[in-house]
Every structure is written in structure tokens, then in C-alpha cells.
Amino acid sequence: MKANIFIFLGTRPEVIKMAPIIKALEKEPWVNFKIISTAQHRELLDQMLEVFDIKVDEDFNIMKPNQKLSELTSELIKKISTFLRNRKPDLVLAQGDTTTVMATAISCYYEKIPFGHVEAGLRSKDLYNPFPEEFNRIVADRLAELNFAPTEKARQNLINEGIPEEKIFVTGNTVIDALFMIAKKDVSLPEEVESYLEKGYRLMLITFHRRESFGEPMKEVFSAVKKLVKHYKDLVVLYPVHPNSNVKNKARGILQGIDRVFLINLQIKVGIIPSKERLVYKVNDLLLTLMFL
């Protein structure tokens, strides 16, 4: 008899980090699995589903403009709990620290269905930074029957919080597997950027959008990027800007119109660049790396 496993996805990072697991499960004869999208994010999630060729079996389409966290959480728990109660899977998997993951863990607890948390044990030790992610991952880890920790440090965090060792498995971070998967694809860059690279310019790719960076921290980073471009005359910057208005407005206000800085809409077509173009700058003895997945 095959095991029935449900995988819940809500945002772009969850798709990226669960994609290797989904692709691995597709090859396993002992499992039937379904993919459920809450669509906590809509457009960005759909982009990643297309990139990794992942088809969802159910879509809750939960996203609403300017939705409060309390409203999102209550709606997710209601929908997920009802769904699980009617389907009764053998195991549920979710990754990370989004509201979708926290609500999934709570719903599994309520319905007495085993929950497995991928990327368990990450901690900042500050309940409000990142907010609400630190709270979300603490809840998910506490309720999980299976905690898949990416590092030994994450494992130790869980043990320190009283989670039994037999529930913890150090697996590594699936984002590395996702990186290897996507690196095999033929990815193009904007023509303007390509023209600079053909002339020998170096490329800096930036991703920057976390909630805890809104306001002054974001202003400081964008101002630093501006200074870097002015100092390094052989540098071209590519920044796929997150659609959140807190990010978009600040980025445009500081970086729009700066020579050799390209602000573009967030699209996977420019999401990954060849490894040879990765850049690390040492500025005033500070190692500054601005290249992420």
C-alpha cells in the first residue's frame, strides 16, 4: 500500500526549496503525493511552478490585496484543516517559515496528522526579527513529527528547545539542490546587461526584499549599491525588484536612473546567472556579497 503525502506550498521560496523533494518523490514507487498551493503569493509562486515544471493538484487562491496577518492566518487554518479532515493523508510536508507553513503545522496538529518540517531549526533568537517568520518556524518545529534540519547548528537549536533527537534529521539545505537544477537551464540576461558583459564589465546581481529590511535598512543598502557603482567603473548591477511597494518605491527612489544600474521586474528569466559572474567585493575590510538565489 502506497503512502499518501501532501505537500503544501504558499510562496516562491517554498516552491524553490521543495522542488528537489517533489522531483525526487516523482521517481519513488512507494508514494502517492499531492501538491496543494495556498497561493499566499500568487504571481511569484506561479512563476516558480512553471520554472520547475510543477503541477498543483489543489489551489486555495488565498491571496488578497493588503491582507492582514491575522486574516491570512485564520483563513489558512480554516481551509487547510477542512481539507486535511476530508482527505486524511499519511503525512504532510511543508518548508520554511511562512504563514502557510505555520498554519499547515497547526492544522495537522488539530487533525492529528503527522507533519514534516523541511528547513527546521533556524533561529534568530528575536521573536520580532524576522517577523513573523521567527514565530512561524518555532511553531512549525514544535508541532512537527519530523524535523529536517539543514545544518548541525539547526539540529542543536531544536535539541536545546527540548525537541526529541529521534524527530530530527540533518539533511542539508534543499536550496543547493534547487540551484544545481536551475543551473542546467539556459538562462538569458537583458540585452543591455549582456552588452556590458561582452565589454568585460563585471556583474552584480541583487535580491533584497525581506520585511525586516523595510525603511532605513533598505535605504542604507541601496545607498551602498549606488556608491559601489560610482567607485567601480567596471561594475554593472542587475536588480530584479520585488513587487512589494515598500521595496519597489524605495529602490526606484534611490537607484532609478543611475548609470549601469538596471531595475527590472522580478522574472525568473533573469533569476540565475552563470557561476563565473558571481562577485564578492571587499570594501573597507568588509566582505560584501550581493549575489543570492
Image (cartoon, rainbow, N blue to C red):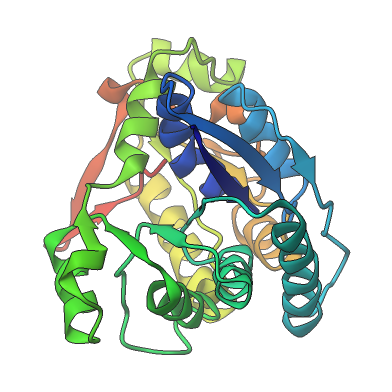
Towards the viewer: 246 or 253? 246
Left or right, 280 with reference to 65: left
Viewer-closest of 290 and 70: 70
Q: Is residue 273 visible?
A: no
Q: Quadrant of the C terminus?
A: top left
In the image, residue 126 above or below residue 146 = below
Q: Is residue 23 left or right of residue 245?
A: left
Q: Residue at x 39, y 13 (%)?
A: 184
Given the current orientation, which residue lies at the most extreme right position?
65
User: Where is residue 201 drawn, in percent x and y?
Assistant: 36, 23
197, 71: nearer the viewer: 71
In this rendering, position of residue 170 left or right of residue 208: left
Seen in the image, is 108 located left or right of residue 184?
Answer: right
Q: Residue at x 88, y 63 (%)?
A: 64
Asked if residue 269 is positioned above or below residue 157 in the image, the reply reads above
Q: Quadrant of residue 274?
A: top left
Q: As drawn, which residue projects farthest toward the front?
A: 1
Is 108 located above or below residue 134 in the figure? Answer: above
Residue drawn where x is 36% and y is 51% of the image: 228
Using the rendered image of the protein, determine whether residue 85 is visible from the camera's viewpoint: yes
Image coordinates of residue 111 in percent, x first then y, are: 63, 71
Q: Residue at x 83, y 73 (%)?
A: 67
Query: In this figure, what is the number of numbered marks?
Result: 0
Residue 26 percent across, percent down from the top left: 49, 23
Query: What is the x, y in percent for residue 225?
Result: 43, 54
